[in-house]
Image (cartoon, helix red, strand yellow):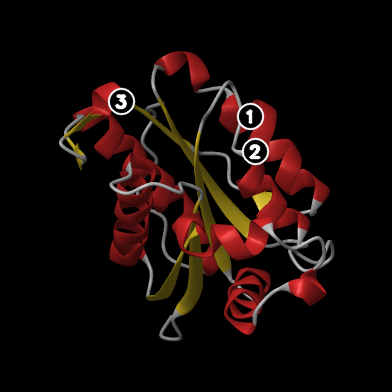
Amino acid sequence: MSTPIKVVAVTGSTFRPSRTLVLTQAIVAELGKHLPIHSHLIELGDIARSVGGALSRKELPETVEHELRAIENADLLVVATPVYRGTYPGQFKHLFDLIDQNALIDTPVLLAATGGSERHALVLDHQLRPLFSFFQSLTLPIGVYASEADFDSYQITSEALKARIQLAAERAAPIFGAVPAPARKIA
């Protein structure tokens, strides 16, 4: 495989520094070890004011329209969001409300989230999977959740989290024809 895969990573945090951004970048970097990729990062914080002020896609500036087209044309989406009060932020949801409902059919989506504690980990399965099921996307079976304890000074310090990121990337690679790594039986 020599043609790079268009990986579009969307990070749903509106703050900097951001653990969600750090997690997103780590996932994309790990994917790059397993696949030839061309990555594009969309930070919600950079476009949040324009997205939040738009009731329809026609009201968006061209810069944001460009980002929406990048999402719609991705070969692989990496979607990471912080968790607030048990779910993703409304601004994150509004961004995906502006995506054409048929544009992500069969698009593989690697789900990730960050939260203050482990008690928010189910956001991957109870909030994000249903959102991307609406789009008829192919949500990958291995998602990545990270809590505050997995970081120190906005750097990933947890070996378990690093292993989970590696596993998610390894399991994503065969979808694009990469030779799968020997299956590891870890969660």
Residue at 66% x, 55% y is 52
- Under mark 1, the amino acid is Asp
Residue 128 is tagged as 2
Q: Nearer the viewer, residue 179 or 138?
A: 138
Structural distance between the alpha carbons of marks 2 and 1: 6 Å
Measured from the top left, where is residue 147 in percent x and y? 35, 25
Look at mark 3 in the image and give the residue it sits on: 148
Measured from the top left, where is residue 81 in percent x and y? 51, 42
Tell whether 175 sits left or right of 43. Answer: right
Residue 2 in the image: above or below residue 164 = below
Residue 126 placement: quadrant: top right
Look at mark 1 in the image and give the residue it sits on: 125
Disc 1 crowd rating (10 Å Cα; few below 14, some 14-19, many 20+) is some
Residue at 57% x, 80% y is 63
- Mark 1 and mark 3 lie on one chain; the one further toward the N terminus is 1
Tally of numbered tags: 3
Q: Are marks 2 and 1 in contact (CB under 8 Å)?
A: yes
Disc 3 crowd rating (10 Å Cα; few below 14, some 14-19, many 20+) is some
Residue 156 in the image: above or below residue 122 = below
Measured from the top left, where is residue 32 in percent x and y? 32, 66
Residue at 61% x, 28% y is 87
Structural distance between the alpha carbons of marks 2 and 3: 20 Å
Tell whether 30 sits left or right of 66. Answer: left
Q: Are marks 1 and 3 in contact (CB under 8 Å)?
A: no
The residue mark sitting in front, 2 or 3, is 3
